[in-house]
Amino acid sequence: MKKTLYVFSSGELSRKDNTLFFETEEGRRFIPVEDTGEIMIFGELTVNKKLLEFLSIKEIVLHFFNYHGYYMGSFYPREHLNSGFMTLRQAEHYLDEERRLIIAKEFVRGAARNIRQVLKYYHGREKDVARQLNAIENLIAPIDECKDISTLMALEGNIRDHYYHAFDEIVGNPDFIFQERTRRPPKNYLNTLISFGNSLMYTICLSEIYKTHLDPRIGYLHSTNFRRFTLNLDLAEIFKPIIVDRLIFSLLGKKMITKESFDRVTEGIMMKEKARKCFVENLDEKLKTTIKHRDIGRPVSYRRLIRLELYKMEKHLMGEKEYQAFVARW
């Protein structure tokens, strides 16, 4: 499995013969390209055309985040696996409202069931989330009844509202009160963590899509429009509860991130660099963690689960096997 490189320092990323080196005021660091799959840039970085050509040849994706840790964009190399046949299948399923709705419903169903699993986990550890758990249980069946994407999106939003209102009970820390979901800028510490984690999840899903025949510009739950990528947003819905949210609860529970991990700035609240490093290091470890896959019968990493989800999508689009979203059992 190729590694993710996280760059927080500012400097220049360059090509040196058949490898990369990152030069900062502290010195020069060589980066082996053969085991690097993606690079996430949080610092100020200088690059040149020679470097981008090399990254394209080596099929390494660059993701850029701004000063506050928000995703800004990607250098998405020429798709080496891009398939005209698969792109046509994706477009056909998007343009046919009935077929689009089938896929979109499965993304929401998978997300809802994984949200339910998270709540069941904490309910079993004597967290008072029964009310939210019951509300979400009652909203899963109506997914089948949705007749259009807007109704489905509204239902998905309702499910997440109930879910987020369980966060205060799960976290149990007055410094990290949820209040309401706020984004750019997040209005409190917990929302800042959620936004940062979700942003990372979107980029990870994008990198995994790059390794398949799928086109990230054609999503189903999120409308395909002038936005650059949408399929990664769809895919992330399934994995955010069991990867990002569980990680946030763990980091807060172990006091690895506290209210001192944030700065208040003009634009809102931002994580300090040390906290961002802590988050990505633990996320990276989480993605490497293996579970026994009930269909394959052998251990696979969380990161591999994301790729397997995309392979299932490909089979659905080709008419080989109906897509069913991954649902955790723990």
Image (cartoon, grey):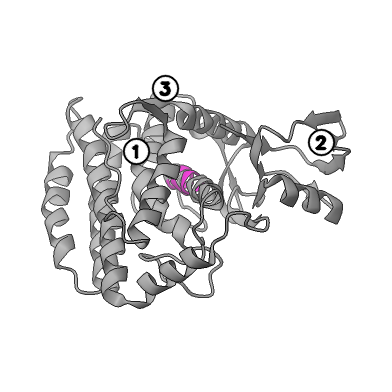
Task: Name the residue at 23% across, 63% down.
Answer: 155
Front residue of this view, candidates 234 and 95: 95
Overall secondary structure of the magenta section = helix
Identify residue for label 3.
254
Amino acid of disc 1: Ile
Left or right: where does residue 42 sit relative to residue 45?
A: left
Q: Position of residue 215 (x, y in %)?
A: 51, 62
**Label 2's element?**
strand
- The magenta segment is 191-198
Task: Name the residue at 41% across, 33% down.
Answer: 247
Q: Position of residue 290 (x, y in %)?
A: 41, 26
Q: Position of residue 184 (x, y in %)?
A: 51, 58
Does the image show residue 329?
yes
Front residue of this view, candidates 104 and 193: 104
**What is the C-alpha distance between the residues marked 2 and 1?**
35 Å
Identify residue for label 1.
242
In the image, residue 193 lies in the stretch drawn in magenta: yes
Task: Return the disc, 2 or 1, that comes first in the chain's sequence.
Answer: 2
Pointer 1 local density, CA inside 10 Å: few below 14, some 14–19, many at least 20: some
Pointer 3 local density, CA inside 10 Å: few below 14, some 14–19, many at least 20: few
